[in-house]
Image (spheres, rainbow, N blue to C red):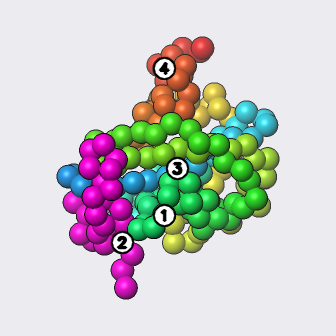
Amino acid sequence: MQDLYQIVDDQDNLIGAKPRNEIDFKNDYYRISGLWLTNSKGQILIAQRLLTKDKDPGKWGPAAAGTLEVGETYESNAYKEADEEIGLTGVKFTQGPKMKFTTPRHSFCQWYTAICDKPESEFTPQPTEVEQVKWIDEDAFFEDVRTNPDKYLPTMSLIIEALYPNSDSRLNGRSV
């Protein structure tokens, strides 16, 4: 049986479910949870999507993210994806902002944040989802997103603006 993913209206109200291959990514809104991990050294954990993914192959994104299946909440999906995609358990997440994306696909993403001081070697990337993970210094990350946006998910600048409300000047090359 195929997994069914939650389909919502443009206000994030549940209106149905579809198998992945039936989702119209330009018209259907679906739900995503995302995990943004930082550590006490001022670094951000980013994950590179598998090179063979059908959406955004090889792009760098948040530590973990996933589409909500029927019966899941944003929070339960965030914990499930963290465990499945990078082997992260035993860390408490804090709910962050919810975002509505209209490009390149229609979705709502509920963000969760956490502080975690595990070294890269202790994460276990899921071979069918994640190429690799790495810690990157916050300032280097902002600079890299600004100068090399094609390395990252197409929504990365919007994600940074939501998670770091005072970061506009960082993305424009000025320090805050």
The first of marks 2 and 1 along the sequence is 2
Q: Nearer the viewer, mark 1 or mark 4?
A: 1
Q: Which residues are magenta?
A: 1-25
User: Of helix, strand and loop, which one carries label 3?
Assistant: strand
Q: Position of residue 97 (x, y in %)?
A: 51, 36
The first of marks 1 and 4 along the sequence is 1
Number of numbered discs on residues? 4
Q: Nearer the viewer, residue 124 or 112?
A: 112
Q: CA distance from mark 2 to mark 4?
A: 37 Å
For the question of whether residue 21 can be seen, the reply is: yes
Q: Which residue is mark 4?
A: 168
Do the CB atoms of the residues marked 1 and 4 lie less than 8 Å apart?
A: no
Q: Position of residue 135 (x, y in %)?
A: 68, 45
Mark 3 crowdedness (10 Å alpha carbons): few <14, some 14-19, many ≥20: many
Q: Position of residue 42 (x, y in %)?
A: 73, 33
Relative to 106, is 118 on the left or the right?
right
Mark 4 crowdedness (10 Å alpha carbons): few <14, some 14-19, many ≥20: some
Q: Which residue is mark 2?
A: 4
Q: Which label is found at residue 147? A: none
Q: Which residue is mark 3?
A: 34
User: Of helix, strand and loop, which one carries label 4?
Assistant: helix
Q: Residue at x 52, y 50 (%)?
A: 34
Q: Nearer the viewer, mark 1 or mark 3?
A: 1
The first of marks 3 and 2 along the sequence is 2
Q: Residue at x 36, y 66 (%)?
A: 5
Q: CA distance from mark 3 to mark 2?
A: 19 Å
Do the CB atoms of the residues marked 1 and 3 lie less than 8 Å apart?
A: no
Q: Nearer the viewer, mark 3 or mark 2?
A: 2
Q: CA distance from mark 2 to mark 1?
A: 11 Å
Q: CA distance from mark 3 to mark 4?
A: 21 Å
The first of marks 3 and 4 along the sequence is 3
The first of marks 1 and 3 along the sequence is 3
